[in-house]
Amino acid sequence: MEEIQIIEAKNHVGEIVKIGAWVANKRSSGKIAFLQLRDGTAFFQGVVVKNEVNEETFQLAKSLTQETSIKIIGEIREDARSKFGYEIGIQQIEIIGESHDYPITPKEHGIDFLMDHRHLWLRSTKQQAIMLLRNELIRATYEFFNQEGFIKVDPPILTGSAPEGTTELFSTKYFDEEAYLSQSGQLYMEAAAMAFGKVFSFGPTFRAEKSKTRRHLIEFWMIEPEMAFMHQEESLEIQERYVAFLVQSVLDHCDYALDVLARNKELLAKYTELPFPRITYDDAVQLLIDNGFDDIKWGDDFGAPHETFIANSFEKPVFILNYPKAIKPFYMKPHPTREDVVICADMIAPEGYGEIIGGSERATDYDYVLEQIKNHGLDPEEYSWYLDLRKYGTVPHAGFGLGLERTVTWLSGIEHVREAIPFPRLLNRIYP
């Protein structure tokens, strides 16, 4: 007899199998006990019929408590009424680990309670679906960049300097020196690109922002590609192909999770159609002003309401091009015909989910980068290694960073980014 996972049930219809699972919920109606089972791959129903099993097995089924772990033996059959499409007719039950007074019951719970019990909340149907989607985005990311000829390089998490200043960084003692938790691996990826051509990193980043919005985490994961011998236009093409690839991969491999999340698959399919629309920062500001946003003027950064309105003006993710130099980091390449903007772009997700990608062409002129480092109040000595990249065979290069959790939030259709990571770190939360 084969032991299988629930997700494999469709391949074993009519067969007797063994499954290890937890009891997520149960109900009974006289002579039938219905068990909602989960094993980490999916949820489905187990059915115990009184006249098909011995009395001991039927009474055991009726007495099972929420989150008790069991091994079951039974026949897989189709179940057209469920989202999963299959169920198991249970013949034998073995208790592995009992569970008593499980705190997250089928009733409604407040978000603070659920966050306090995040280690258990992860077991629920919706949270599992979100994590399955997150896993697919990670898998697809490696597939995309591998097939595009990128090398994965891991930048350090502890750094002695910051690409965007130290005001929003967590500092720590590094023996007798000051160090910071990384807010981006970009500068190191630029060095790697000069060694390997096309590189990407995937790792945790940290921002000490005192923000409580539904889009912000203190600790989150970033995918940061960097590409030598590349200008911004080519980088934008890679960005939109990458995002379209992620969306298509979710559609191809996360059917069950998307059903659980009640996600509109036809809507998601639109996000795979290239190219994505583009609008300049100048035109975006004018669009907002023309539509009654009197709180914005040229030179301001966009807030959530601004990004949402701009996104809603298009049917797909949209690039906003060439922001003011004054509100962007020191390393961005200046515009060839304008002093006031840099060659950069943010990709804004549809449906009000905000920025998911920020990127730019990188400045290559040694004197210009040195001047910008000084203008930003940074110590040139700390960036001497970065300036070396402009001294020894510099080339046009560009890169970007995609925030994994914001992308998960968008593609899952959930309201808050805190559910897009297994154990979120928020302004007032570092437990569990």
Image (tube, rainbow, N blue to C red):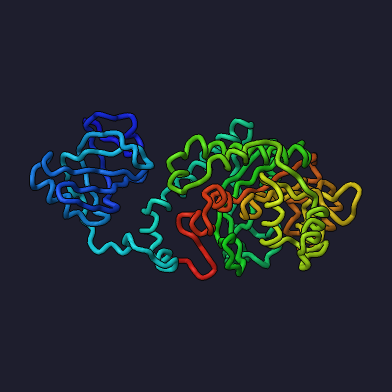
| Quarter of the rendering occupied by the C terminus | bottom left
**Residue 99 drawn at (x, y percent):** 23, 58
Q: Is residue 141 visible?
A: no
Please tell me which residue lies in front, 199 or 336.
Answer: 336
Please tell me which residue lies in front, 96 or 285.
Answer: 285
123 versus 427 height, above or below: above
Name, please, the residue furthest toward the left: 55
Residue in the image at 34% along x and 41% along y:
81
**Residue 49 drawn at (x, y percent):** 16, 42
27 versus 177 height, above or below: above
Please tell me which residue lies in front, 358 or 249.
Answer: 249
Choose top left, top right, bottom left or bottom right for residue 427.
Answer: bottom right
**Residue 75 drawn at (x, y percent):** 22, 34
Please indicate whether residue 310 sits to the left or right of residue 158 in the image: right
Please indicate whether residue 58 sits to the left or right of residue 117 in the image: left
**Residue 46 drawn at (x, y percent):** 25, 43
Choose top left, top right, bottom left or bottom right for residue 237.
Answer: top right
